[in-house]
Amino acid sequence: MAVLKTVLYLIVYPGILFLFVYATFVEWFDRKVYARLQNRMGPTHTGRFGLLQPIADFVKLMSKEDIVPDKADKTLFTLLPIFGLAIVATAGLLLPVWHTNPLQPGFNSFPGDIIILLYLLSLPTLIFFLAGWSSTNLFSAIGGSRVLTMLFGYEVPLFLAVLSPALLAGSWRLAEIAAFYRQHPLLILPNLIGFAVALVCVQAKLERTPFDIPHAETEIVGGTFTEYSGKKLAFFRLMTDIELVVCSGLLATVFLGGFGGGIFLGFLQFIGKTLAVVFLLSLMRAVTGRIRIDQVVSFAWKYLAPLAVLQLLIVIFIKGWVL
Amino acid sequence: MKFSIPIGPQHPALKEPISLRMTVEGEVIRDADIRLGYNHRGLEKLAEEKTWIQNIYLTERICGICSHSHATCYVQGVEKLMDIVPPKRGLYLRFLVAELERVHSHLLWLGVAGHEAGFDTFFMYTWRDREIVMDMLEAISGNRVHYAINTLGGVRRDLDEGLRQKILSQLDILRRRTEFYIKIGANEPTFVGRLAGVGKLSKEKAMELCAVGPMARASDIARDVRRDDPYGIYAETPFEVSTADTCDVLGRVVVRVKELFQCYNLIEFMLKNLPSGEVKVKAPRRAKPGEVVSRYEAPRGENMHYIVSGGADKPERLKVRAPTLANYPATVEMLKNGFIADIPLIFAAIDPCICCAERTVETVDLRTGEEKVLRFSELRTLAQERFDKNPRKGTGLWPF
Amino acid sequence: MNDLDTIERIKGALGSRIVEITNPAPGRIFMTVAVEDLVSVMTNLKRDLGFWYLVTISGVDKGDAFEILYHFGYEGGNLNVRTQIPKPTGIDEVLKEKTVPHLPSICAVIPGAVLYERELQDMFGIVVDNIPDPRRLVLPDDWPEQNFPLRKDWKFERPPEVIPGGKK
């Protein structure tokens, strides 16, 4: 029974099948919100309200010709999309959507899983860099170097912002942090600065406007993905979608009180809260223009990092004097 | 480490083929080179073989966006050669279309600038409002892009009272929307951060390199053919030259938005003071021998047509100078020491119209490779070799 | 500043180098100079008289000579400086006797003129001496030599179309 449960966990919910379906839905949601904010229709034709459009795009890319450049490192070039997909799917398993009981640690919920999750979310950046570098295209190389440059900007504020609620809750385990905030809902309020900082950092991590610099199409064509086509590009796109789900899930867990109340209620909460986070991310994408790479780094260190430190100070203050 | 990146002939930032070769150090551009010749159609040669009337439609096809500009520039030159004066109403309608075209071109450019800066929402909004102008133009002339309203001696279609009122009422919408764009353009920090201080072109450099149009006006050179050398009805219309002194891309945005308001005023003036009467006079088939220089302020800068007539029903020589060509030397200057991220913005800031700038010769015959320039004939040989050597996948036949 | 004042100013500065100066229409001044005086006239026009804005350079094939026009824009009109260089007759003669038409470059005075001079080289086969960048501007790289499209004796012959891999 335990084996069946684990298999179900890995394959169906919240494993790869659920992640695939939900990631495509989130992509549809993001595209629709973005389009409506821009006075466009967005996907309309495939399925009801165009719901199947991301899946149709995925299938279409899977059936396209797959080209590997002559000069590229073929092994690396081929393996990177698979590794990337595996990494973000693994990160998806750590979200406390199934295993919500804070008293029972398991392979998918254990003290320190927030660190593992953050670490797994850092790896896609490295994957993108290697992808750009291994395709030996000029535009990809510039895109790859931009990915790394941006990493130095947003990674530290993101860690500070995400870890301060954990400090307040006094736990390194996602399920326990979520349970803590469900018990003390008012303590969500002091973390709002951190939530804002984390939202901006997640936007940068996901390389969406205003931080879509590594694949800014009007500057460096496709950026890191210039040479990717067919199945590999489909995998990368799916990887970005799943990363969006995982990042919004992480923010929802840490800042919005997680997904309590058993499997079904938890499932509904998961959908509602991640969509709320994704809506905020889409809003940010619609109302800003792309900034320059030097502006990203200076913005991150001038505003995001001090704000994250301020959040940390607030948390320490509350923990020392109020609780 | 220095390396050179090719922007174009095919690149997402370029709507038309041109090749920019950038030598970059990290993210900073050290040198730039522009290569033209991908879009030549042999227009000046062709014009020598067509009649005066046929050439109106030929010049209209020099450019898609400022089609009316080239046609008007040509037509008013030929009218001088033929010694005919179009009736007042015809002239008013001709320049009404011209100002509407300027509005549509500037709104289009604002959208493109937004897109190049990665601000797609701005792009979608301006292009939605551009539809209003396009609809007006369609109602006046019957066409959305090539209006074909000019003819020798006036215009081809008249305007009725209902349409006049409708355009006047829609102008208010456009005014309101443009005010909204000023607010966004001046307040959205990511957008301003991308535009301010980018693509500097000092006044001295702009004069030395003969920059024209909004480029020169953004470098504080108050030059506008409509005021300096008034043609048509511009001597009697109220109008100011818009300038900015920031010398950067933001200044070029400001100049264009200011010009939009001037255009709305001009359109309103023309519609309210529309004279009655005929819209055209009959033109002779032949022009007297002579030469004429016709100048016209297109949305992108000054158009100049130099027309020589030998007394026949065809021109001896038609020389076309489009504003984009005049702005290329200044563009190279602006690109130096900029960031890679600024290339599309700086290049878009001249509102490049490559098909305008290149009109003279027959075919497009050049493709660039990664490291060397491949001629088209060599490329074809290479492609054939590769096709012959590599076996086709599968049977190469449809399975059914 | 009306046209007569402008003409007087130009006459005062250039003196005997002007071969002819006319004013056929309001705001249009046509001036003829000898090709030897071209660069010095341009220098005077720009440095002393403030004609900094070169609109374009037009070439016209007059049959036995090339007429080159330098169009300047100024506040109030348009000044056209005309000069003529003799034209070698026939393409074969050019190949045999190497009598190519020469024109001095004005890029040292007006840097913005380089594109127009390159266009002249392409279109008329006029060799512009001392041009900073003599590459082709508009013609493709594999354009046959000694074909100058805007000369009146040039006719375009469409090469027979060959479809690669198609039927003979």
Image (spheres, coloured by chain):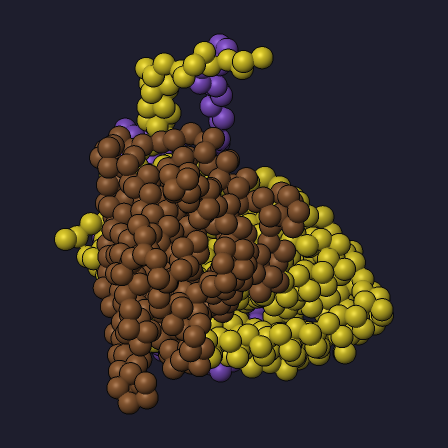
B217 vs B260, left or right, is left
Q: Colour of chain A?
A: brown
Q: Residue C146 at x, y = what percent?
A: 35, 33
**In the foreground, A117 or C122:** A117
Q: Is residue B227 visible?
A: no
In the figure, the yellow chain has which letter?
A: B
B384 vs A298, left or right, is right
Q: Residue A118 at x, y = what percent?
A: 29, 59
**Residue at image location 14% in from the left, 53% down from the top:** B1
**Residue at image location 51% in from the left, 72% down from the top:** B256
Q: Residue furthest left?
A: B1
Residue A40: image quadrant is bottom right
Q: Colour of chain C?
A: purple
Q: Residue furthest top?
A: C168
**Residue at image location 38% in from the left, 82% down from the top:** A190
Q: Residue A24 at x, y = what percent?
A: 50, 48
A187 vs A264, left or right, is left
Q: Residue B50 at x, y = what percent?
A: 62, 41
Q: How many marks?
A: 0
